[in-house]
Image (tube, grey):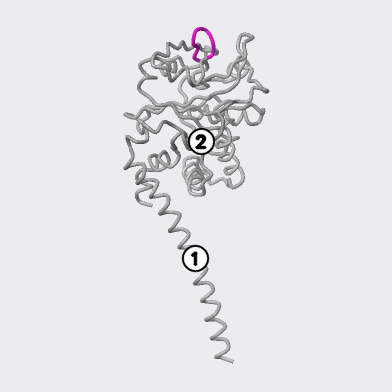
Amino acid sequence: MIVILIQPNRFQKWNSLKPTKNFNTERFLDDKDVLNLPDFIEAIPYRSQPHYVYAVHPENRFNTTIAGGNGDCSNFSFAGAYHFIREGIDFELIHFLPPNSLFSGGGHVAVRVPYQLNNDTVVGILDIAGGGVPLLDGIGADYGDAQKTEPNLEFIRVSDKAPIYFKNYYTNEFLNSVYLGFTPASGVKRYFRFIENFYVPLGNDKLEKMVYDGLALFSGQYYDIYTDEELLSQFRVERYFFIGMLILLRLLVTFMFLIVIYESFRLILVSKFEKRTYE
């Protein structure tokens, strides 16, 4: 518990990152339902100085971020995912993972979604926090386009209210310094469903996020991030250490539960024996 409390971000990240080879399902996105990109983005009241949103309940996160304009790239992406689920739009979360600053705020999160823009319908990356999309040769760029050695992407903002800073995540310099990862919609739905089923307000957003994200991770309901084995191999010892911490925690909790059952059963037997002796 001490290790986990000292390094909660590493504990969470290393137990959610998985090699892409572990994902055995097709990554095809169903484009039957398409996002009307201009309507969605232009309705977001982007704040000039947004703050990080700790709200863990999906609806609260949506109300604060998409409806309220607050949050960072992760907040906007997860809140957008909640909207896509409600609208029946297929999606993935896209993670930009820099090995040199993975735990110091150097990464980024966007979404991959079927969207319509300028009468064109594509499956591509949407940066909700940046209020726009990357293009390749004038067409919406997809996951594979961002992985090219020389992506040559152009980022366009759909909303002038969105921060212009986010275009920096689609330069060749940044893209060549990161690994990409993805979280399928099924993983986000599982995570949201867990939170919605067990959520009880605790009076503090930061505490709620730590508690419910921790419980989701412990119970195997947290979302996975699938990424390149090459990235994971750079942190092999650290990754296995924190995976081992989670396994150990599960074993300890199971062992404690068995002890409680044993002691309860023993007390019942002792109580019955003492009663018979007294009689």
Give the Cα separation between the discs numbered 2 and 1: 34 Å
Q: Relative to the observer, which residue lies in front, 18 or 35?
A: 18
Residue 200 is a magenta residue: no
**Secondary structure category for the residue under label 1:** helix
Residue 139 is a magenta residue: yes
Residue name at image x 60 percent, y 18 percent = 115
Residues rendered magenta in the picture:
134-140
Can you say whether 198 is above or below 181 in the image?
A: below
Residue 143 percent location from the top left of the image: 49, 21
Specify whether 211 is left or right of 186: left
Kindly identify which numbered label has been placed on residue 258: 1
Q: Which numbered disc, 2 or 1, marks the residue that appears first in the sequence? A: 2
Mark 2 closeness class: few <14, some 14–19, many ≥20 residues within 10 Å: some
Tag nearer the camera, 2 or 1: 2
Specify whether 9 is left or right of 213: left
Kindly identify which numbered label has been placed on residue 23: 2
Give the amino acid type for the residue marked by disc 2 in the picture.
Answer: Phe
Give the amino acid type for the residue marked by disc 1 in the picture.
Answer: Leu
Residue 211 percent location from the top left of the image: 49, 46
Residue name at image x 43 percent, y 36 percent = 19
Mark 1 closeness class: few <14, some 14–19, many ≥20 residues within 10 Å: few
Q: Relative to the observer, which residue lies in front, 102 or 105?
A: 102
Residue name at image x 55 percent, y 12 percent = 158
Q: Main secondary structure of the magenta part?
A: strand
**Secondary structure category for the residue under label 2:** loop
* Viewport quadrant of the C terminus: bottom right
Can you say whether 260 is above or below 135 in the image?
A: below
Can you say whether 182 is above or below 198 in the image?
A: above
Residue 97 percent location from the top left of the image: 40, 28
